[in-house]
């Protein structure tokens, strides 16, 4: 039965990481930078590179969360007031889809709750098992 806790714990960790990555994407969604091929690109920090979380099954049970960069990492946006804008006024904006990030955060919430419930039920079951009287 110990594997039940390991499986649920891996789900909790994956949900936490999913929420962390999504929150970072939302917080940095406006962190523009120069287009990579702009003449002054080396003088300014690049645009934020958003990430995503993919979960894969682990042999023996459980899940593993893998973080990778979203590709393409930026979209072209018009901001002629930015000091790093190219001659046309374009900058690199992080390729963050806020609707998708909301879905990721809701998914993380339910994933975390479901795995926490598994741990709770396991704990109650073990307590009940140990309370058997002869």
Image (spheres, helix red, strand yellow):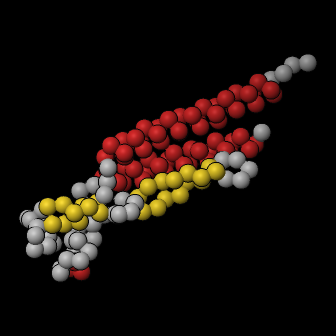
Q: Quadrant of residue 72?
A: bottom left
Task: Name the image quarter holding residue 94.
Answer: bottom left
Q: Quadrant of the C terminus?
A: top right
Looking at the image, which residue is at 42% across and 63% down?
A: 69
Percent position (x, y) of residue 108? 47, 42
- Residue 81: give x, y in percent of width and height: 8, 64
Residue 10 can be seen, yes or no: yes
Above or below for 63 versus 125: below
Q: Where's residue 96, x and y in %?
A: 31, 54
Looking at the image, which residue is at 74% across and 44% down? 3
Q: Residue at x 47, y 49 (%)?
A: 18
Residue 83 in view: no
Say if 47 sits above or below 105 in the image: below
Q: 74 and 127: which one is in front? A: 74
Q: Nearer the viewer, residue 1 or 25?
A: 25
Residue located at (39% from left, 50% from top): 22
Q: Quick check: 95 left or right of 54? A: left
Whole-percent x, y for residue 17 in the image: 49, 51
Position of 129 relative to 101 (above/below): above
């Amino acid at each position: 039965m110990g594997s039940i806790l390991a499986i649920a714990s891996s789900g909790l960790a994956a949900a936490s990481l999913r929420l962390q990555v999504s929150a970072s994407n939302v917080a940095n969604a406006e962190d523009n930078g120069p287009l990579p091929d702009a003449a002054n690109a080396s003088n300014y920090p690049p645009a934020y590179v958003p990430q995503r979380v993919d979960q894969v099954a682990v042999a023996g049970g459980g899940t593993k969360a893998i973080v990778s960069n979203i590709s393409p990492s930026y979209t072209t946006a018009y901001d002629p007031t930015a000091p790093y804008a190219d001659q046309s006024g374009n900058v690199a904006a992080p390729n963050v889809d806020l609707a998708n990030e909301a879905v990721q955060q809701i998914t993380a919430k339910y994933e975390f709750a479901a795995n926490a419930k598994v741990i709770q039920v396991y704990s109650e079951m073990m307590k009940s098992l140990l309370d058997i009287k002869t």
